Amino acid sequence: MPVSQYYRLSPQLSVTEVDDEVVLLKLDTGSYFGLNPIGAKFVSGIQQEMSLHEICASISEQYQTPYIRVNDDLKDLVDQLVDQQLIEAYEPG
């Protein structure tokens, strides 16, 4: 998956913020996924229509963590969220 890829939340998804974490609830199936603060930053980034690269760069800078580590961690998260149909890739424009 290219880092320039964009993602959006599933239309059947409810997003609830709890402190600095996020819970994603798929309304049509009742499945849910809890996200830590980094996952919450990812969701915030896709809600702002940022690319995966932009989100990784922002998190890397904010948490002073190497970009490659953030990128690897987020790719794993993206794979899980796509598999559960909580997010989907799209082409902007």
Image (tube, helix red, strand yellow):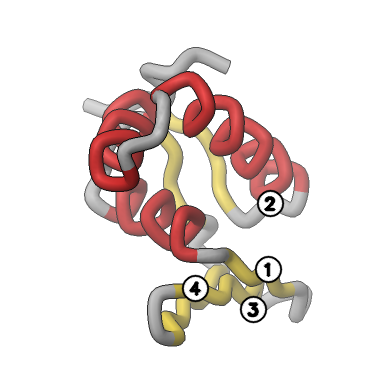
Which kind of residue does numbered mark 4 sit on?
Answer: Val
Please give the name of the residue rendered at 40% of the width and 84% of the height, measured from the top-left corner: 19
Q: For mark 2, what is the residue?
A: 85
Q: Secondary structure at mark 3?
A: loop
Kindly indicate whether the residue at mark 1 contacts the one at mark 4 (C-beta within 8 angstroms). Answer: no
Q: For mark 3, what is the residue?
A: 27
Q: Which mark is residue 57?
A: none
Badge 2 density bin: few <14, some 14–19, many ≥20, Cα 10 Å:
some
Q: Secondary structure at mark 4?
A: strand
Label 1 or label 2, whichever lies nearer to me, is 1
Q: Which mark is residue 22?
A: 4
Cα–Cα gap, marks 4 and 1:
8 Å
Which kind of residue does numbered mark 2 sit on?
Answer: Gln
Q: Earlier in the sequence, mark 4 or mark 1?
A: 4
Q: Is residue 40 left or right of residue 46?
A: right
Across and down, in percent, residue 79 comes to: 69, 36
Q: Secondary structure at mark 1?
A: strand
Q: Nearer the viewer, residue 8 or 28?
A: 8
Q: Nearer the viewer, residue 22 or 9?
A: 22
Q: Is residue 87 left or right of residue 84?
A: left
Q: Earlier in the sequence, mark 4 or mark 3?
A: 4
Please give the name of the residue rendered at 37% of the width and 55% of the height, measured from the top-left corner: 41
Q: Which mark is residue 33?
A: 1
Image quadrant for the C terminus? top left
